Amino acid sequence: MNLFRSEEHIVRWLGGREPGATISVAKLSELAHAWWGDRVSKDWVPHTREQNTAILRRLGLVGGFWTLP
Amino acid sequence: MEPADLALRRRTYAFLVEHGRGPTPAELGEPEEILAGWRRLHDEHALVLNPATDELRMLNPFSAVPTAYRVQAGGRWWYGNCAWDALGVCAALHEDGRLETSCPDCGDSLVVEIRNERPDDESLLFHCLVPAARWWDDIVFT
């Protein structure tokens, strides 16, 4: 789960490996804030699979790659 | 998750936020009891232990050990486990921040300032190699 300068750098870094998923750092920030925003809250309880799936869907992160176990 | 484990997790994270580092078992109580609780939390993916030493490895999104993802937020430097977690440090602390890392391809320094939950350089890309269904197969690799 890395940050890259551009798509060209991702392709070169993969070196022929099967690519995963690429999103913009702006989308990543939205994801991070939705996913981790409550993590040090005194009231934190574990997210359910459904809650995490809803976060991904809201951000358009759908399909097999983003399907949680 | 049992209430006692939830409370232990809360105390563990509170220590991290207060001190800027993860606690040792003895800093939270009777070491064997704390370790037993941490092992249960590890099994529930609520934190990650180093399997060889039982030391804290991840208090997601924070890393308890140095990584390639340094984050300045809330007047301190932290480590994230990956790019997602590094931005998660700002999210968890509800702070603006600064992420410093490097492009894994070329090694060039990458710096991202986060203000009001937005990165200042939106040209950078995040690549996730492992599908979500397998993230916890090997969370350190993920």
Image (cartoon, coloured by chain):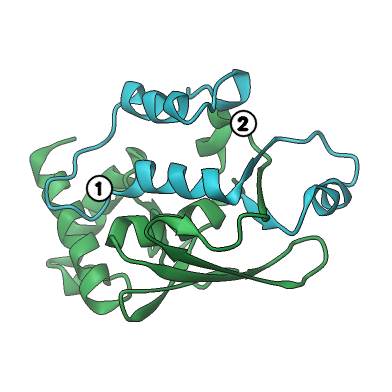
Chain colours: A cyan, B green
Q: What's the mark number on residue B131?
A: 2
Front tag of 1 and 2: 1
Left or right: residue B55 versus residue B100 is: left
Few, some or many residues within 10 Å of mark 1 (<14, 14–19, 20+): some
Rendered residue at 18%/44% (across/down): A44
Chain letter for mark 1: A
Badge 2 element: loop
Left or right: residue B79 versus residue B73 is: right
Which of the 4 quarters of the picture holds residue B54? bottom left
Q: Is residue B58 visible?
A: no
Q: Which amino acid, mark 1? A: Asp
Left or right: residue B116 versus residue B36 is: right
x and y percentages locating residue A53 in the rendered image? 41, 24
Q: Is residue B79 visible?
A: yes
Chain letter for mark 2: B
Which image quarter is the C terminus of chain B in?
top right
Work out which residue is located at the far bottom of the displayed protein and give it. B75
Confirm or deny contact between disc 1 and disc 2 (CB under 8 A): no
Which image quarter is the N terminus of chain B in?
top left
Which of the 4 quarters of the picture holds residue B129? top right
Rendered residue at 41%/55% (across/down): B88
Rendered residue at 25%/57% (across/down): B35
The tally of labels here is 2
Left or right: residue B27 versus residue B62 is: left
- In this rendering, is residue B5 above or below A65? below
- Front one among B5 and A5: A5
x and y percentages locating residue A63 in the rendered image? 59, 18
- In space, the residues marked 1 and 2 are separated at their CA atoms by 24 Å
Rendered residue at 37%/29% (across/down): A52
Badge 1 element: loop
- In the rendered image, which residue does mark 1 sit on? A38
Q: Which amino acid, mark 2? A: Pro
